[in-house]
Image (cartoon, rainbow, N blue to C red):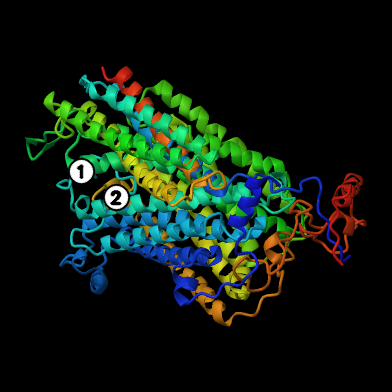
Amino acid sequence: MAESFKIVENPEKPLSMHPKKFALWLFLVTIVMIFASLTSAYLVKKGDGNWRTVDLPSLFWVTSGIIVVSSAVLHIAYRAAKKDLIENVKWGLLITLVLGIAFTVGQFYSWGQLIDNNIYLVGGNPSESFVYLLSGFHLLHVVGGLIFGIVVTVNAFKYKVHSKSTTQIEMFATYWHFVGALWIYLFVFLMLNHQ
Amino acid sequence: MSTAEAKIAEEVGHDEHHEHHGNFFTNYIFSTDHKVIAKQFLITGIFWAMIGGALSVIFRMQLGFPESSLSWLKPILGQWITAEGKLDPEFYLALVTMHGTIMVFFVLTAGLSGTFSNFLIPLQIGARDMASGFMNMLSYWFFFASSVIMFISLFIETGPASGGWVIYPPLSALPQAMNGSGLGMSMWLVAMALFIVSTLLGGINYITTVINLRTKGLSFSKLPLTIWAFFLTAVIGLLSFPVLFSAALLLIMDRNFGTSFFLSDIYINGEALPNQGGSPVLFQHLFWFLGHPEVYIVLLPALGITSEVISTNARKPIFGYMAMVGSMIVIGFLSFIVWAHHMFVTGMNPFLGSVFTLLTLIIAVPSAIKVFNYITTLWGANIKLTPAMLFSIGLVSFFISGGLTGIFLGNSPVDIQLHDTYFVVAHFHLVMGSASFFGMLAGVYHWFPKMFGRMMNAKLGYIHFWLTFTGVYLVFFPLHYIGIAGFPRRYYSFTNFNAFNDFADLNMFVSVAAIITFVAQFIFVFNFFYSIWKGKLAPANPWGSNTLEWTTPRFPGHGNWPGEIPTVYRWPYDYSKPGAKEDFIPQHIPYSETPESNTPEENEKIKLESGNGDIEIKA
């Protein structure tokens, strides 16, 4: 028979999610697993005894605030992109980047506070190393996000981010909200478990 | 179609209708074509398998012939052979470590998943290529970089990593502990970090492709079992490899920056180290949280390949398709909650041990279902004993004989007795090592015609199979006895222990069998490379198989299908269907073309194929 039929039972592509967005979500899963394993290692180590209480730097409160505000601003920029308010997109992205850099600098100052309290990455109890490790490894992901953000911002200034082309800003927003939420999780986790 | 979908079609399908003519570099080296990347993984995997096998032969010679002189190996091993012609004891440890690392990660993870996931996923689901060809290319080149570093570490003066493939600290964390914990260990960690990146890039791609890029009509319930296996393998890898990354990260911090996550109360030559407060058992938890799922990352693709090969060559539908899928999902889930059965002797709470024993034994249920289904598929079948089929049946045999000893070892009271003996070595070499290796070989023999457009020589394949199959049993069956007798693994020599002298001849026997088995692999290597250029040209569908890859041209180009991608109408196991003209009906044949073999329910589906105005008829 030389005819070919379109099957009606299942005529569409089975799932129409953008492959790149989908891959980003899978990438986030791997980051979740890394931090899940690090924080469970923290709990296992703590349960093991020989644990020293660490006073968390007060600046963590400030940096947490900064990253929450940056997420909110980015969301506004994303909404603006959907409505083709290009100027708002540009400003929103710029403010997000500035806040992201402020967060990065803030984390460095937080480590300075730890050092002032004689808490070092090296040479002390694992409880002290863990604070540096968790915040430092998280910061690495923030810096990655900033580089991604710079690319998106440059594209926004070239008028390439608008309602017909939101994939990039949407992926950046997903990632940025994720690293923000991840930091809040780590901060709350450390507050609950540092003793 | 919504705008989002239109955009996807635009971005994903941009290269559907024109040929790509790159240069040598873009076609064969930095290629983004999944078929080329698969071949790159395969050939790198074969290279590593020969290295890993050669290392095992060297240490088997030490174990089987401890009195003999190995000075003839001096041209290759140089300083690692002492002046008396003996193998350096520290290099012996390096050999077992690198044999394990290479075989588990570089051969059976990258070589197996990397090859067949890349090659078969787009071809069997009817996709032009992977979701991201660029990421796929990166995946191979990260693996290549990792391979180069691991390979160089074999040749450095202090030797490669030597603390066992599990690299437990403190041995691996302290460079002063042994030569292999110096530069060799650092290179091991860097290589593995790159390897993890490669695996994750590959895995993200496999999952995205299977979920998003299936052809029309190919629902999950019509997926070939190979694709199910590769998909679940990628999911397991995505969840477990990041944990190994964490373990490696903490170990690197301890080694190179002076933290104490895994180190506490250590004295070297009477002097205390400054590290306080760490726990080496913590590393074992992190390592085995990857390490156990890794067993299934290695095994599931082989089981998937076997399902496909057995069904095709038995000319029968696979018995219990949904049970096969279900047991793979259950195995995948359970693999994450049994890791502590590797740690029964770490001083864990005996109650916790019994919980992990219970969970471990539950894995026997889905495994037994799979074995049962393989055997019932073979039962009363019109079996075609192709080389691929023989290797698949060999896999089932190893899976049974090695799986049974898994039930012993899963019990903490038995494991405490047998822990770290050759019984464990025999167990995992059968159930995981040899079984997966046979799955890989079955896959190569079965899909070689699709990969290179030519057939491998079947006679050489039979010789290769029988030598390897008997060889594997002759090597690993005696190891059970040696293990029950109490031989610990990783020991350089047993000649100083009176209790073990009786087993010297058995060890010699094992070593001879191992050498013969290793030499037999060169038959395969010759057959493989000879057939790439000189093999007989393959027919379009040499095995009479149902899956979509056999609808492509003999040498599928970029984009796989020259015209439109075929639509899928039926499951992939319509073999020997009663009433059918031939003993197989490929997946892209609609029910309307096979009225003679349709069941009443399938006749109902014809209406769906042509119904309500959505007809697209081509003359």
Residue under the image location 35 percent in, 43 percent down = A146
- Quick check: can you spot residue A75? yes
Vertical arrangement, residue B351 with respect to residue B380, above or below: above
Residue under the image location 55 percent in, 65 percent down = B35
Residue topped by disc 1: B255
Instruction: Please report, as a chain letter, where disc 1 is located.
Output: B
Please tell me in which quadrant of the rendered image residue B509 appears: bottom left
Tags 2 and 1 in contact by the CB under 8 Å rule? yes
Locate residue B218, reporting x and y percent. Answer: 72, 50
Q: Residues within 10 Å of mark 1 (few under 14, many from 20)?
A: many
The residue nearer to you, when weighing B301 against B1, is B1
Same chain for marks 2 and 1? yes
Residue topped by disc 2: B189
Q: Amino acid at mark 2?
A: Leu
Locate residue B253, reporting x and y percent. Answer: 23, 40
Vertical arrangement, residue B141 with respect to residue B211, above or below: below
Locate residue A39, reporting x and y percent. Answer: 35, 29
- Quick check: can you spot residue B293? no
Secondary structure type for disc 1: helix
Secondary structure type for disc 2: helix
